[in-house]
Image (spheres, helix red, strand yellow):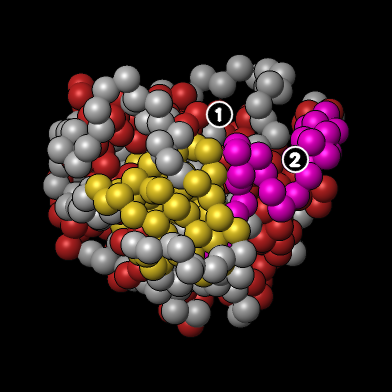
Amino acid sequence: MSILLKNTTYIDWKTLEFRNTNILIEKGLNREIQFVDNIENQKADQTIDCKGKLVTKSFAVGHHHVYSALARGMGAPKKNPENFYEILQYVWWTLDKALDKDMIEASALTTAMACAKAGSTFVIDHHASPNFIEGSLDIIANAFDQVGVNHLLCYEITDRDGFENAEQGLSETENYLKSNQGLVGLHASFTVNDEIMRRSVNLMEKMSSGIHIHVAEDLYDQRHCHDNYNKRVIERLNDFGVLNSSKTILGHCLHINEKEREIIKKSKSFVVQNMESNLNNKVGYFNSKGLGDKIILGTDGMHSDMLQSAKAAFFVGQGFDTIGYDSAYERFRKVHDYIALNQFDGDGENNLVILDYDSPTEINQDNFLGHFIFGINSNHVNDVISNGKLIVKDRKIQNVNESEILKFSKEQSVRLWEKMNE
């Protein structure tokens, strides 16, 4: 199975070099692409004329929450949250406890479709469904596979709902990792006691994986850690060996001091920035000072649009961070380095996005970053190729029936909202 893209303007995602060429794409995991000058005798199963369009590597989401997909438009919580902990308690922990099999499936299918239509073919997700843990990761994986989006999943292990719940999270994680690539998920330091933390890190080491955890998203995390363990969050995680793996992802990292930043910089771990979620929760602003360059971008379940996340990081960062056109793009693309470094499957060169970018000004290698920040957005995503297979064509999902899934998800959202109000 092969696809020929003819008359392309190809942009190398690393060098930003522009190249007028034709591209032959083979189906399969981690395949290279072939640049072809003469296509007269070139055979392919499918040919797409890309004249006037831009072709480049597709995108990847560094931190997502499938479980939040059905939250859009839901009613107000039973109590108006007055701080971050109450936002979790009355909104997200109420929602995730209400999730069942059908709700999780609807959430995963709609998330995968949204990611694909926004140009992402790889998603790193952090899942929670405390009353439906066993098999939840397989449900999400199957949904993403149906749409054609590659994934790196984990279940959010926590003892906030009791030891038995944490045990189930550990069991689900181990069972999933036996036959799938994935991570060991933890909610946050303040909901993971020492025993569960130790067992999670042991599982990480046993399965040659990494930890995916929220870190100092709010000052509450630091206060809890100081009061209960007499140390700061990064110090606690480091003492347990969480930061020893290059597969470890530290979410948010807003309220950390210089010592913690130095520990992170010297470690193998990556930090994921989620600007819009931080704004929504009023928890603070990300600052990259002293963290090094292992910074990736995520959506934190707010949406599935990585181009939007990059713009948010850039614009908000003008007042609270040191970030320019180049570093915004670097963070946007750093997730590919994370995936490659850790040899995860599903982000090969045969993952491409075709942009129908109708710019009123010239675009070239020298000014591409200006277009990236101020021009290109997900509305320009015309076609998406994942593992050499076309999963979005002319802005339409190809592998599943989008209208049927949206009908299903609307039904499940009503069920979810009713259950949350019980």
For the question of whether residue 75 can be seen, the reply is yes
Q: Alpha-carbon distance for marks 1 and 2?
A: 32 Å
Residue 397: percent from left, percent from top: 67, 44
Quarter placement of the N terminus: bottom right
Residue found 60% across the figure and 58% down from its top: 46
Residue found 25% across the figure and 47% down from its top: 18
Q: Residues within 10 Å of mark 1 (few under 14, many from 20)?
A: some
Q: Nearer the viewer, residue 143 or 252?
A: 143
Q: Secondary structure at mark 2?
A: helix
Question: What is the span of residues highlighted in magenta in the rendered image?
Answer: 388-414
* Residue 397 lies within the magenta run: yes
* Residue 410 lies within the magenta run: yes
Q: Secondary structure at mark 1?
A: helix
Residue 117: percent from left, percent from top: 57, 40
Q: Above or below — where is 236 with respect to 405?
A: below
Residue 133: percent from left, percent from top: 72, 59
Q: What amino acid type is highlighted by mark number 1?
A: Ile
Q: What amino acid type is highlighted by mark number 2?
A: Glu
Could you tell whether 369 is left or right of 7 in the image?
Answer: left
Q: Which residue is mark 1?
A: 87
Give the farthest residue toward the front.
40
Could you tell whether 394 is left or right of 20 in the image?
Answer: right
Q: Residues within 10 Å of mark 2 (few under 14, many from 20)?
A: some
Could you tell whether 60 is left or right of 13 in the image?
Answer: right
